[in-house]
């Protein structure tokens, strides 16, 4: 999406935006949110470096979604984009459906197991 903002009546500025979404990821929303809060507002190169070396399971799928958002913005823009100007403007996670399973226990009982899923959305923009 190209958004035009006018600072005054003579200047207009084009802002290129793109987003990527990962759905039904087998992660807890709390654990994914912990990683997303650390990269929100950061530049692409810095966020990519942080995600590569984070010890969390959520970092790998979030890195793939971030790469997808960068590819989306490069497809929208016909000329080459400068990756140093890309900034993460929004990184959110929402709760997905919970997979419900049962673990057999002693004396014929069953213990419920809830496997949470989440949807992650990352929006990036070219900042100048």
Image (cartoon, rainbow, N blue to C red):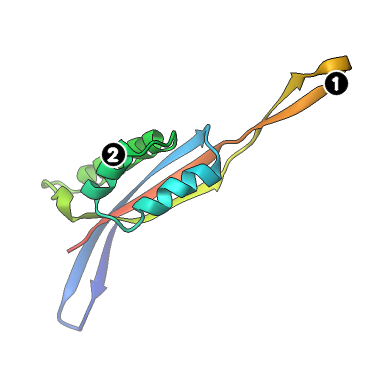
Residue 68 in view: no
Query: Residue 66, position in %: x, y?
Result: 32, 42
Q: CA distance from mark 1 to mark 2?
A: 46 Å
Q: Quadrant of residue 4?
A: bottom left
- Are there few (<14), some (14-19), or many (20+) residues within 10 Å of tag 2? some
- Are there few (<14), some (14-19), or many (20+) residues within 10 Å of tag 1? few
Q: Which residue has dot 1 on it?
A: 109
Q: Which residue has dot 2 on it?
A: 67
Query: Residue 23, position in %: x, y?
Result: 49, 37
Q: Residue at x 39, y 38 (%)?
A: 59
Q: Residue at x 78, y 26 (%)?
A: 111
> Which element carries disc 2, helix, strand or loop?
helix
Left or right: 3 as drawn, with respect to 116: left
Up the image or down, 60 lies above or below 101; here it is below
Query: Residue 89, position in %: x, y?
Result: 33, 58
> Which element carries disc 1, helix, strand or loop?
loop
Q: Nearer the viewer, residue 41 or 2?
A: 41
Q: Quadrant of residue 100?
A: top right
């Amino acid at each position: 999406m190209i958004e035009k903002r006018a600072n005054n009546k003579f200047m207009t500025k084009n802002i290129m935006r793109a987003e990527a979404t990962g759905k039904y990821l087998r992660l807890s929303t709390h654990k994914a949110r912990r990683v997303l809060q650390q990269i929100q507002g950061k530049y692409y190169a810095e966020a990519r470096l942080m995600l590569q070396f984070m010890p969390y399971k959520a970092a790998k799928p979030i890195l793939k979604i971030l790469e997808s958002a960068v590819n989306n913005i490069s497809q929208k823009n016909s000329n080459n984009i400068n990756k140093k100007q890309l900034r993460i403007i929004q990184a959110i996670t929402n709760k997905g459906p919970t997979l419900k399973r049962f673990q057999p226990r002693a004396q014929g009982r069953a213990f419920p197991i809830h496997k949470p899923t989440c949807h992650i959305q990352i929006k990036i923009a070219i900042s100048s």
